[in-house]
Amino acid sequence: MTQEQSARLLPQKPSRWAKILLNRKVPILLFFLLELAFLVFSYLSLQEHFPSVILWEHLLSVFTFFYLLNRSMDSRSKLSWIIIISLFPIFGTALLYFSLADLGVRRLKKRLENATVQVSDYLSTDPEVADYLSQSDRQLQKLAYFLEHSPAQFPIYRDTEVTYFPLGDDMLPALLEDLKKAERYIFMEYFIIDEGIMWGEILAILEEKAKAGLDVRVMFDGMNEMTTLSYDYIERLHKVGIKAQAFSPVKPILSTYYNYRDHRKITVIDGQFAYTGGVNIADEYVNKRERFGHWKDTALRLDGSAVQTLKALFLTMWTVTGIEDKRDMERYLQEKPQQRKSQGFVLPYGNSPLTYHKVAEDVYLHLLNTSTDYVHIMTPYLILDDELVRAMTFAAKRGVDVRIIMPGIPDKQYAFDIATTYFKVLLDAGVRIFRYTPGFVHAKVYVSDSQQAVVGTINTDYRSLYQNFEDGVYLYKNLEVLKIEEDFEKTQALSEEVTLESLSKMPMAHRLGGYLFSLIGPLM
């Protein structure tokens, strides 16, 4: 394969000026700045020629405050908006209504609704499983009922083998081996793809499989075209036989459309095997490159019936992003995975910011509210709404051992500073918090009572719970739950506990920054 044909290689390095001109960031940022400048200029002109506009500013602010108070919205989000509108009445109010109007999102919502209806015909709980739950485990039945009656109708499965990987380093060899064994198709959907050793090894297999006639599809979030990949990367993949799409590519037009990102990490192979978890396709996720110390991440491999849901999630997003083709979805969804004898239950699910059903948060709340012994959490970010704060503190106050492991070396200092603003109320309630000394925790794990666990892409912050497309896998009485808890204990042994005393010794700049950023944390 020639250098020109290989998508694995970075683009040839142009001259400095050519690089600037070819970089999509430059024209897009210029257009955004011009649009903002026009809005500011218009506002200042109004103030100059119509002094009474200041009175109307105050009236508009008061009206907006009443509107916010009566709107169904988390109180922390309301407070953030009130602060912004108080400081910048016209700009803040315009920003609020602009975000609520979801301009440019209606078409996306409609396409998502259509695709969801199409895939729902192929997602249903086995009647035997439903009967068993109704007679033997009412608590699990209630959660299964909730998820099956969400807009996307996520069923619960048995007959699925699950493998837990405590590190991305452990997942990669298994993923490569399964990719090499693919016989019909490979679907990959990732928030981040970055050229390097990991992607190079994967891409070499994908090119080979595409050349052999397999249906190979790759989808990544559109922000990659601004950050990690070249502007023509989709074309490069097409040239080597790989179908590729970018979700919500950034364009020089002001829209709330860009606020919704595809944060999922899914690989589906022949409809029989699937991978998901926190691991993106970039070298730091498998510790091939050091960023923020040792990178602690987790993943799951599914083999069996539950792969059907992850396949449906991928096909839904593929259809939403590209050309709507009902027959394309049907030919893959009609095929059901082979069943594998396994203990316990598996319930994969997705979270969409375009519905009022906050599935991801409700599953986390279920674990916190039903636990009797412990809930152990690993998360890179901790930006909580009122419900999660109450659930965590109430669980701790009723004697549940609630522990949270966070990064020792954060990737975003402002995000960690915001997290520290929650530490005191959590510590006072009895929640224990740890920082992973060797480096960065990117894992998104909840495990409870040696019976139930969630592993997926869902951070414990506003962006994951409210603004991103996410996915997770709920496990119940599966043997891997014990391995997840064992991994948590090993990770805690490498971590330093946060106390009220150590919290008081934090640098004043970080403490002050945390409180300032927390005022708009729900909007970040």
Image (spheres, rainbow, N blue to C red):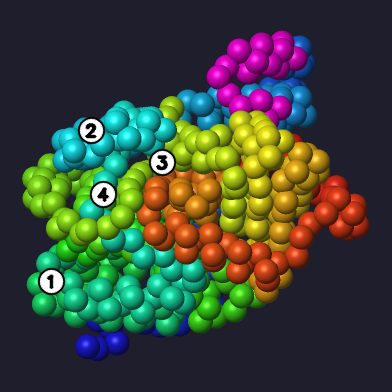
Where residue 260 appears, as percent x and y from the top left, is 46, 43
Quick one: label 3 or label 1, which is nearer the N terminus?
1
Callout in the foreground (2, 3)? 2
Indicate the amino acid at tag 3. Asn
Indicate the amino acid at tag 2. Asp
Q: In the rendering, which numbered label is found on residue 473?
A: none
Q: Residues within 10 Å of mark 3 (few under 14, many from 20)?
A: many
Q: Check disc 1 and report the residue beneath it.
A: 183
Under circle 4, the secondary element is loop
Q: In the rendering, which numbered label is found on residue 131?
A: 2
State how far apart marks 4 and 2 are (Cα): 13 Å
Indicate the amino acid at tag 1. Glu
Q: In the rendering, which numbered label is found on residue 158?
A: 4
Quick one: label 4 or label 2, which is nearer the N terminus?
2
Q: Is residue 55 above or below residue 141?
A: above
Task: Please say if the residues under marks 2 and 1 sit with CB atoms less than 8 Å apart.
Answer: no
Q: Is residue 73 magenta?
A: yes
State how far apart marks 3 and 1 are (Cα): 30 Å
Q: Which residues are magenta?
A: 58-79
Q: Quadrant of the C terminus?
A: top right
Q: Check disc 3 and report the residue beneath it.
A: 351
